[in-house]
Image: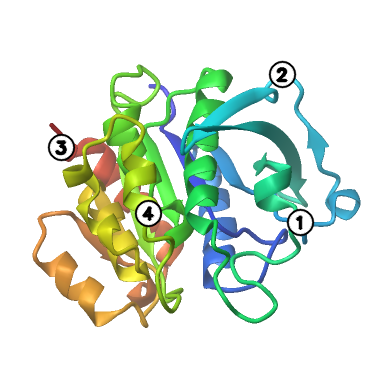
Amino acid sequence: MSKTKVLFVSQEILPFSSDGTIAQSAREIPQAAHERGKETRIFMPRYGKINERRHQLHEVIRLSGMNLIVDDSDHPLIIKVASIPQIRLQVYFIDNEEFFHRKALMHDDKGELFPDNDMRMIFFAKGVLETVKKLGWAPDIIHCHGWFTSLVPLYVKKLFNRDPHFADSKIVMSLYDDAFKGTLDKKMQKKVAFDHIESSDVSELASPTHTNLMKLGIRYADGVIVGSEGVAPELTQFLSGTDVPVLHQYAESDYLGAVDEFFDTVHAGKSVLVD
């Protein structure tokens, strides 16, 4: 029997970024899945704050060199890789000078959201999926961590749905208490719809708040993990009105085992139907 393949996509991963809940979960869950016999790949953005020399990042030439179109403009994609010390798991980094070489992650030095965060999200999501195609690897489960990854479920189900690498992929979306204030660019819906996606498919993006981004991710997910007790009540209420399987990670004493079993449940279940 072939191994279950799990693709992890996260906005942060230890030890390359902060030690918050997202970064820690995105570090521990792939290791646990690997140790339980699953085949894994891990992706995150290559933020400017990451010290390439310290973490021994290096470019993967065979995967780099592609241009991705975001809002009718070409942007070069660079892929770098590094290993998580002591556990022999590689992390692939989505890199682009315009989007990811700034030292901060999502906010400027005044605490304001970067005005191009929507473009960065689009580039990151496309970059991950295009790179997975280049790897010739077809994930059974795609596990997304954090609001910055919330376009991945949409793209898998709408933009890459006829690609054999993703035709049978199931999506798991993890929710955290990582809410930001305000909204992303009000034109985000139009930018995402540029890729032959109907505006009705991304109606939540008419007002791209944190809550609406996560609702969009949930809409195209086959399973949802509540990773923090402080997830917005509006999101937990929204979840209760769906049929998607839910795991409350924060309430599990052995959350790594519970998440791994949840992967098996979602993998065996029926995928979300998308027109």
Q: Which residue is the site of mark 1?
A: 48
Whether residue 203 is visible to the viewer of this picture, yes or no, is: yes
Horizontal relation, residue 267 to residue 257: left or right? left
| Residue at 75% over, 44% down | 83
| Residue at 31% over, 69% down | 211
Task: Specify few, some or many for label 4: CA neighbours under 10 Å numbering under 14, 14-19, or 20 or more.
Answer: few
Point out the tag, 2 or 1, that comes first from the N-terminus: 1
- Front residue of 10/87: it is 10
- The kind of residue on which mark 1 rests is Gly
What distance separates the C-alpha of mark 4 from that of mark 3?
Answer: 34 Å
Point out the tag, 2 or 4, that comes first from the N-terminus: 2
Q: Which residue is the site of mark 2?
A: 62
What distance separates the C-alpha of mark 1 from that of mark 3?
Answer: 40 Å
Check contact, mark 4 vs mark 1: CB within 8 A.
no
Tag on residue 187?
Answer: 4
- The kind of residue on which mark 3 rests is Lys
| Residue at 59% over, 74% down | 20
Point out the tag, 4 or 3, that comes first from the N-terminus: 4
Secondary structure under badge 4? Answer: loop
Q: Which residue is the site of mark 3?
A: 270
Secondary structure under badge 1? Answer: loop
Point out the tag, 3 or 2, that comes first from the N-terminus: 2
| Residue at 70% over, 55% down | 47
Q: Position of residue 71 (x, y in %)?
A: 46, 39
> For the residues carrying marks 3 and 2, which lies nearer the camera in this image?
2
